[in-house]
Image (spheres, grey):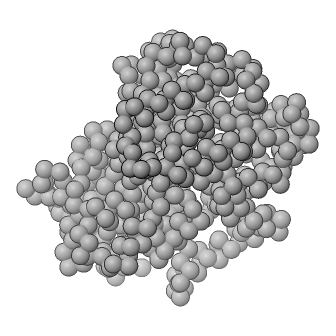
Amino acid sequence: MTAGRYDVVVIGGGANGLVAAAVLGRAGLRVVLLESDEALGGLGRVVEFAPGFRAAPLATDSGWLPEAVARAIGLEPLERHAVGTALSVVVEPGTWLTLSEMAWNTAGDLRKHSATDAAKWPEFTTRLRRLAGFLEQVYMRPAINIDTRSWVDLPDLLSLGRAFRALGRTDMIELLRTLPMSVWELLDDWFECEPLKAAVAAGGIVDHAQGPRSGGTGFVLLHHLTGAPEGSVRGRERWIGGPDAFTEAAASTARRAGVTVRTGAAVTRILVRDDAVAGVVLQGGEEIAASGVLSTADPARTLLEWVDPVWLDPEFLHAVRSIRHRGCTAIVLYALEGLPTIPGLVPEAAFDGVLSLTPTLVGLEKAADASKYGAISEAPHIELTFPNRSWLGLSPPDRHVMVARVQYAPYRLKDGAAWDSARREALADVVTRAIEAVAPGFGSRILHRVTWSPHDLGERFGLREGAVSHGELGLDQILFMRPVPGWGRHTTPIGGLYLGGAGTHPGPGILGGPGWLAARRLLAERRQRKGGA
């Protein structure tokens, strides 16, 4: 059975798919967006894990919505909470260190632990903001084409060069030094307080299957601070309208642009004829004809599972198969009858932010060490959030939701072991005991708990190897090398097939950024084929 013909099929109803579809629709193209799940949202999807209890477990950080992306789809401004995400780290049971967005407030709390570090803190956060700000400018441009000989690319290169020079001599050097550096070495250069270093370093290993000693984790830290306010060392402010506020707004703009949105429509094959896209095939056999396909699924899934390999060069296929994914994050969701009592955690507003249970760099590294050998860490790194503190509708009255993000839980276990119910429950027991150590009596407040391993996340959210990032943010997998070297500008060897998900430049956490750049590339090539400028 063949459906009506469209100009473009967009695969994926997450942030990137919605933005790409809206951009293309506003350009006058006939667009259909296909989402395999029954709900839109992608990795930001809100799920009910117990009767009356909901959460967006993979979107505890709301992400950065670039102004250029919002303008491109005609999105009305979305309000965020005025206060940024505080990060509190346990020093020892009964003692916590809270890093708020207000650098001077943090410095005051830090003096109890290190007067030297307190004096350095404002300068450190200011520098992080400047360096992350430069990445923001890089991310709003197509990936640099290092092989270009065309004058068309010259304005972008000159503009980027001016932005780099604008950093000034000191920050230019610091940027070049920080990107390949380990976050451990970076923080050792600045501070002496171990819990402070551990709290910040955890931002350099988010969904990253390496520990803080690994090179390139300095870049990972800066990447996840793009769009964050000065003073913040973890994440962006939350949406006032709820965890799905962006999804709802972007879906509305896409529909207003004439996009046909279909949920429960799983793609099983991308049709190719004469080296060019001809459409897609859905589960059940329905064919949708189109001269363009823009996939926001991860590149490996798109190219290895949905495209007949006869259309792709063996060397290209080898490069795609070599993309490192290595999912390492597990989620434990708790339905609670009340907030846990945590001695030493003041004020209560700290529950609105992130609670980190790893007070040392050594602890982070040891947690990573286990995963290198396919083992589940016996003392994993755990971060807690309470989303219904910001959005009351996620739980029944006087009840609470807690999301525990756990690293490291490797996707592939040693000796071919499976992520069965016994291993999931064993991991949940480890997490619960770790929380009990700082919140006595926590277990008695649990009404229900659900554990999702990287394997479960892969099945629920369509993630290859359970990788939330759609491919590690290693230095060899970013910018013009994302997803693979030579194909960092959202095109593929197949005419009319484009990639616009988090596995492409600029990567995860930039809401709609990859989708926006991919849609622009598609439109530019259509104009070129028609003889336009």
Query: Residue 503 versus residue 368: which sits nearer the camera?
Result: 368
Q: Residue farthest to the right?
A: 115
**Residue 43 found in image quarter:** top left
Q: Position of residue 116 (x, y in %)?
A: 91, 42
Relative placement, left or right, of 392 versus 23 is right
Q: Residue farthest to the bottom?
A: 149
Question: Image point 47% across, 77% down: which residue?
Answer: 486
Relative placement, left or right, of 450 versus 127 is left
**Residue 2 found in image quarter:** bottom left
Question: Image point 55% across, 65% down: which residue?
Answer: 478
Question: Image point 32% across, 79% down: which residue?
Answer: 313
Q: Position of residue 189 (x, y in %)?
A: 83, 54
Q: Position of residue 179 (x, y in %)?
A: 68, 63
Vertically, is 281 above or below 365? below
Vertically, is 76 above or below 477? above
Vertically, is 430 above or below 273? above
